[in-house]
Image (cartoon, rainbow, N blue to C red):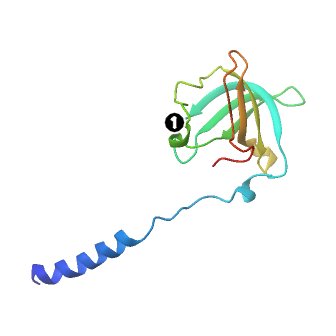
Amino acid sequence: MTVKRLLIPLLLVATTLASVPPADAHHSFAAVYQADTTITFKGKVVQFLYRNPHSVLHVLAKDDAGNEVRWAIEWQGATQLGASGISTETIRAGDPVIITGIPGRIEAEHRVLLLKIERTTDGFGWKSRDGGPDL
């Protein structure tokens, strides 16, 4: 087979692929979170995973019975947070925080979509632009 016979189909495939817009795959907000409910609780940051497509805070907090529970708090991605001035150094393990968010549909997962965070030691805070999810 000649190079010319291979080059034309390859160019057609490359042109086709280049013209296709990227897919915006995303999980359904309503399938994962209770959109009509918010919760607020105090705890200490265990871990801050600064990444895309979503950053995640792990916070240890006491439940109503006084047992410690580890919450996974879904936040904006690193790109969005970075544009807001938030970096890997902004939130650290041990920081005492107050979290307000939308709870996950499966209570046992202890999952929250972050709407607002306050650090009680210095007044640092962040909240969703319009009071709803910013994902």
Tag 1, which secondary structure? helix
The residue at the far top in this view is 121
Horizontal relation, residue 43 to residue 66: left or right: left
Task: Pinpoint residue 69: horizontal percent, then vertical percent.
Answer: 77, 32
Q: Where 103 falls versus 41 (above or below)?
A: below
The amino acid sitting under disc 1 is Gly
Residue drawn at the location 75% of the way across and 25% of the way down: 43
Task: Pinpoint residue 84: horizontal percent, then vertical percent.
Answer: 56, 35
Residue drawn at the location 52% of the way across and 40% of the way down: 78
Residue drawn at the location 70% of the way across and 15% of the way down: 121
Q: Give neighbour class at mark 1: few <14, some 14-19, many 20+ (Cα, 10 Å).
A: few
The residue at the far left in this view is 2
Q: Nearer the viewer, residue 80 or 108?
A: 80
Q: Which of 44 and 15 is in front in this view?
A: 15
Which of the 4 image quarters holds residue 18? bottom left
Which of the 4 image quarters holds residue 54? top right
Residue drawn at the location 73% of the way across and 42% of the way down: 112
Task: Pinpoint residue 22: horizontal percent, then vertical percent.
Answer: 46, 64
Q: Where 101 falls versus 62 (above or below)?
A: below
The residue where tag 1 is placed is 82
- Quarter holding the N terminus is bottom left
Q: Nearer the viewer, residue 106 or 37?
A: 37
Q: Where 120 falls versus 12 (above or below)?
A: above
